[in-house]
Amino acid sequence: MRAAVLHGTAGSLLLTGLVAAPAGGAPAWPGPVRSAETRGTAVAAERAAAAGVRFGKCPRAEHLPSNVRCGTVTVPLDYALPDGKRIRLTVSRVRATGKDPHDAKRAVPRQGALVYNPGGPGASGMYFPLIGFLPEWKRIGAAYDLVGYAPRGVGRSAPLSCRDPAHPPKPLLQSPTAPSASYKKARIAEAKAYARGCARRSGSALRHYTSLNNARDLDVLRAALGERKLTFMGASYGTYFGALYATLFPTHVRRMVFDSAVNPDPEKVWYENNLDQSAAFELRWADFRAWMARYDKVYGLGRTAEEVRRSYEKARARLASSPAGGTVGPAQLQGAFLQAGYYDDYWPQRALALSAYLKGDPKPLIQVAGPHPEAAAEQENGSAVYTAVECNDAPWPTDWRVWDRDNTRLARIAPFETWDNVWMNLPCAYWQAPRQRPLDVRTLPGELPPTLILAAERDAATPHEGAEELQRRLWGSVLVTENGAGTHGIAGGPNKCVNGYLDAYLLEGGLPERNAACAPHREPVPPASARTARRRA
């Protein structure tokens, strides 16, 4: 449940957001000056403060229990024109319980609203308030209203799509790690068609789906909730526009948690960040293979990481010639194992599915990797928002030869994710909307209250170097690292040390005097049923 509530569907830089800066120096962005967008944000926030949020029963479409309440917040489509077209963002909330989870007689003072974003771009935070029912979150849920929302473009918040979600394309079963020239040509054509579809279906509105506007929306949401200052936690991509918020509105910040931070360096946003991510996933894939090798007596996939790799490649080859159930080919296999690169609690299930498939039982693999037609519309919406935000945010190489050169080199040492990452982001090479220049994330001493950055040392989706870079740019921030671990998103997870720092900061405003480290959480172990079945075999 935790992974589903806190994080979006695993994908590429989730980052699942994106690069080049102007020649000769810093990005040509004016910074947090009194621009038309800044004035428009102030106008929209003033209106939102007066209107508030009318929370009531959640629409059936949200699939939320009755104790979660829902509402909407109105924001300008274009902040330079606050009196122009407006869109509505959906919001969810569970009020602070006010009760100490360890002492029912002790009242806990309310500290305001804690607003959360799970990343993406393209992920919804509407389910976040449910996190308060988990033991690790009850102390925070006692002091804070837990507030989630769907960013612009996501879910029912002025939703985007780049092709008809009612008629999704036939899933590609192949996913070659060394694609041929003809395969590349086909994927280029697909990327061009997707970029055209985004432009055709959204028109002139498409350009306004950006990280900067996500940051501005966050300030309007703050005002609508009646909060003078914002308490916010963002994960993955949510750390990026959270950092933009800190740069644009430092005096509006109360507390901010950046969980699994994106590298905000304008030179990295977004093309270079994706290259770094592909390289990091190769290391995490090696971690997973080593884990499977340690449990060879359970899974029978090999006693070394290299033997496990050969078992995986054997499955890929078999699926390429005969997809499991007609629906699971190498692409679906790779997608399922990519998710295991994000969250190690997926490891036992994925290893069991691979083991069973190689022994003649494809059902577990079909279960974890097979398509889910009922989720096609949601997946297309997430893909469209991801693509729009990343492509709008920054310049991308527009010459295929640059992509081909860089990723061919990278794939020689990091074949696991490299080419799939390319195909996901390639529409940005052919984007038809205007591009922005990334804002130079940076705060001066005393400008921003102290903030907390959390990162796992071996996180593949947002490599640890990004957290280090963010700390250098946000004066007064403190970095807490979970050493030797690689789960993407560590707040409120199984590591009590990490959670201790999170609680101390959100509940008391306390931070360590300098960067801190936690020992890794315990890696998963195969379930007893798998161990027993192996012994009986």
Image (tube, helix red, strand yellow):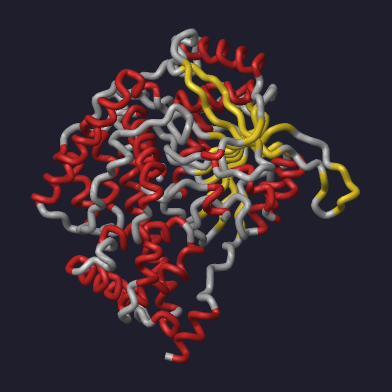
Instruction: Provide residue 536's location: percent of width, then percent of height.
Output: 46, 91
Rendered-image quadrant of the N terminus? bottom right
Q: Please tell me which residue is depicted at 56% across the width and 14% down the height of the picture.
A: 44
Q: Is residue 289 above or below residue 533?
A: above
Say if residue 468 shows up in the picture.
Answer: no
Q: Residue furthest bottom?
A: 536
Q: Give residue 221's position: percent from left, percent from top.
A: 59, 25
Quarter of the rendering containing residue 231:
top right
> Which residue is found at the position 87% from the left and 51% from the top?
104
Q: From what the image shows, is residue 418 above or below residue 233?
A: below
Q: In the depicted view, which residue is nearer to us: 99 or 362?
A: 362
Residue that protrudes farthest toward the right in the picture: 105
Q: Is residue 503 left or right of residue 73?
A: right
**Viewer-side residue, 120 vs 476:** 120
The residue depicted at 35 percent of the width and 80 percent of the height is: 302
Vertical comparison of 146 with 46: above or below: below
The picture quadrant where one finds residue 430 is top left
Residue 287 position in % (x across, y down): 42, 66
Residue 73 rendering spot, x and y as whole percentages: 57, 23
Q: Is residue 198 visible?
A: yes
- In this picture, residue 412 sits left or right of residue 531: left
Residue closer to the observer: 255 or 221: 221
Q: Residue furthest front?
A: 60
Number of callouts in the render? 0
Which residue is at 38% across, 42% downward? 377
Quarter of the image with the C terminus is bottom left
